[in-house]
Every structure is written in structure tokens, then in C-alpha cells.
Amino acid sequence: MKPLHALKVNFEEIIKWAKRDFVFEITDSVPYFHAYYWKRNTTWLWDQGDNRSTWKNHLKNKKMKEILERSGWLSNYKLIEEIDNRYLAGPYGSDSEIQIEQSENISDDAITYKWNNEGFRGDDLIETDEGVLSLGCSITNGQGVPYKKIWPTLVSKELGLKNWNLGIPGASNDACYAFASYWIPILKPKYVCMLGPNIHRRYFVDIDYKIEQYLKEEETVEKRADALWDLVNGICKKPDSDKQRWQGEIKRLESEIKSITDSKNYDFDPNCTRTWPHVNWGSIAESGWDDAGLHGYLKYTLLFDLDNVYQSKSNALKNIDAIKYLCIKHNVEKFVYIYSDDIKIPYIKTNHSYEDVKEKEFNEIDYDDLGRELGHPGIKSHKWMADYFLEKINE
């Protein structure tokens, strides 16, 4: 059974699927959710962890600024400085993630985040093409590194194939499987390369929460439509001498009603993943530990119960084995895996993390291997990872 794409079907289909919770067959599938789908076909100058606020904070810190200078990111910033100064704020007035016009002319040596037709940082996902499918987290996404220098881009370019990079910030092994299970059968990639995320991460889709939010939004829309109809009916009751003046307003109201009812023009976003359920302890206490509060507490606790090393390693291995099976089933020529925390990766051996970089002496830092936000591998490790995947593909 082909998975339902949560933003390409009427969400009523997802609700129907959820109501079949007592029916299970080996051919079943689960709906496909993607938190960044809303960013499809957009370009960002600053995005996710590599955001403008982080950059400004680094510049205020004497040591961080010197690290940025030694690693070349201060000079690299000059490639976007003029454009950056023209965009005062991002969506909703944010000074962190900054979306820009796609028509902006920017050097490919600069860092931009262009999201493709399905909300990933890679070539458009078109099933008639031939490509390399890459799985992973923010490292695979290439946080803090120019697109042309990240490992999925380097691998696909060397092989002369499309770059189907499905890496997203914060991804887990569960998320890698979720993306693989939807896209491998559709794209039928020649190769699949996976830079495994940290094994302690989890991907939870709170389907009950999504359905609850959808139904609430639908009720709100219906009330709005009813209110508009009341306005129309009120106008129609006016004296004949006034009706002619109100014809334009009636047409506008009817058009608005059609828009919100026919096109389901809701604020509700089914791909708002809520993969890590946030628990507001104040709200729970005020609720007197009612069913909703207790439910939230139990989900929060479950995250910690699943975080022990046995469960984490078991979960990672199950997902990796499942992805291997998908590759065999769909005739992928080769599946290559390496763990993102593998000590062989240069960044892991030297810089390892933002906290480590912050505490190290200047002569201990590998300046060729820092992403712009100083918390992810740089160009050196991306080159190493690309060489690793290519070597394994060519064995």
C-alpha cells in the first residue's frame, strides 16, 4: 500500500487511516510527514542552527569572532553582506532565519539554503531521473557549509547522478527510515548513502495531536464561513434601493467563503511534526493532572525511558536493517553506512562539538573543519565523508 503524503491528500484521509488502528496487514504503510515541506521551492540566507542570531552572538564574543576569522567565515560573509543588509528580518519579524528572493544573484561559494520541490536541500525529487539518495541529519543537510561543498553534493557530482539529499536538521534513525520508506520505492535510486544520526534521538509523530488540531481548525473555519453567510443574508434583507450598492460586497464575501471551504485554506499544518512532544508543566499542574495532563507527562517520561543504550542501539539497528531491506527490494545497487559520531571522521577526532570548540585553546582547533555556526563539521570532514562513500561504492 502506497503511503499517504500528509500535505498532498485531504487530511480526512489521514483520519480515516488512523481509525483503522485495529486493522494491520504486512502490506500496510504509515502516512508520510515532513517538517520542512512548507519550505519547498524557497531560498534562505540563514536557516536552522546556522542563523543570523547565532552569527551576531559569535561576533560579540572576542574568541568566537577570532575563530570565525581564522576559519575563513568572516571573509566568506562578505559574499552575502550586501544582500544580508537588505533583509532586515525573516518571517514573522524573526532575526534568525532569513528567507530571500530566489532571484538573488549569489556566488556558489557563499552559504545559502535552497529547498527543493519537496523541502530538502538537494536536486528536485523527480522519479524519471537517476540519482544518489542520501540520508542523515543536519550534517548531511550541510549546516554551515556551502551547498557545493557538502558530502551528498560531492558524491553525486563525482558519480554524475542527481543529488537526492534527504538530510534534515535534528533527524533520527526513525526519520531516516520514514523518508527512505516513502522515497526509495518512488525514486528507485542507484545508490543509498546514510550518515547515521546520533542513536539516542527519536522521531515521534503525535498523530492524535495532529488530528485534534485539524478538527479544531476545521470547526473554526466552519464558524467563520457561517459568520460570512450571516453577513450575506443580512445584506440581502436590505431595501431594494440599497441592494445594488452591496452587490460587490456580496461577491467578495461569497468568494471568501468559497476560498476557505473549498480549498481548505486552514492555518493547520499537518507536517508540523511535534516529534518531541513538549510538556508545559505549569499547564499540567493547573489541570489537576487530568487525562490530557497525565498523557503529556507519560509521553515526556517515555522519551527518557527509551534513551538507555540498549534501546537506542536496538532502535538504530532495526531502522538500518529496514533501510537495507528497502534497498534490496527496490534494486538499489549499493547501500553504504557510517555513523555520524564515528571517530574516523576528522571533525569528531578534533573539534567534536560547539562546546568543545568553545573550551579549546586556539592551537587545538582545526580551523579547516568548522561550519559557519561553529557547531557542525566543516569542509574538511565533508570531503572526507564524500571520499569514504565513494570508496565504498566503488569497491
Image (spheres, rainbow, N blue to C red):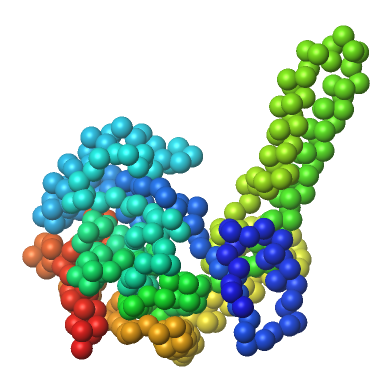
The vertical placement of 248 against 36, above or below, is above
Residue 13 position, x and y percent, is 69, 64
Residue 237 position, x and y percent, is 91, 21
Quadrant of the rendered image containing residue 255: top right
Residue lying at the far front of the rendered structure: 128
Q: How many marks?
A: 0
Frontmost residue, 47 versus 43:
43
Q: Quadrant of the N terminus?
A: bottom right
Residue 149 position, x and y percent, is 21, 61
Q: Is residue 147 visible?
A: yes
Residue lying at the far top of the rendered structure: 241
Q: In percent of the image, x 75 and y 72: which residue is there?
A: 19
Report the side of 208 relative to 136 (left or right).
right
The vertical placement of 235 against 381, above or below, is above
Q: In percent of the image, x 20 and y 46: which residue is there?
A: 107
Q: Quadrant of the C terminus?
A: bottom left
Residue 337 position, x and y percent, is 32, 83
Frontmost residue, 2 versus 362:
2
Q: Is residue 65 visible?
A: no
Report the side of 270 relative to 179 (left or right).
right
Q: In percent of the image, x 59 and y 72: which residue is there?
A: 3
Q: In percent of the image, x 73 and y 68: which residue is there?
A: 16
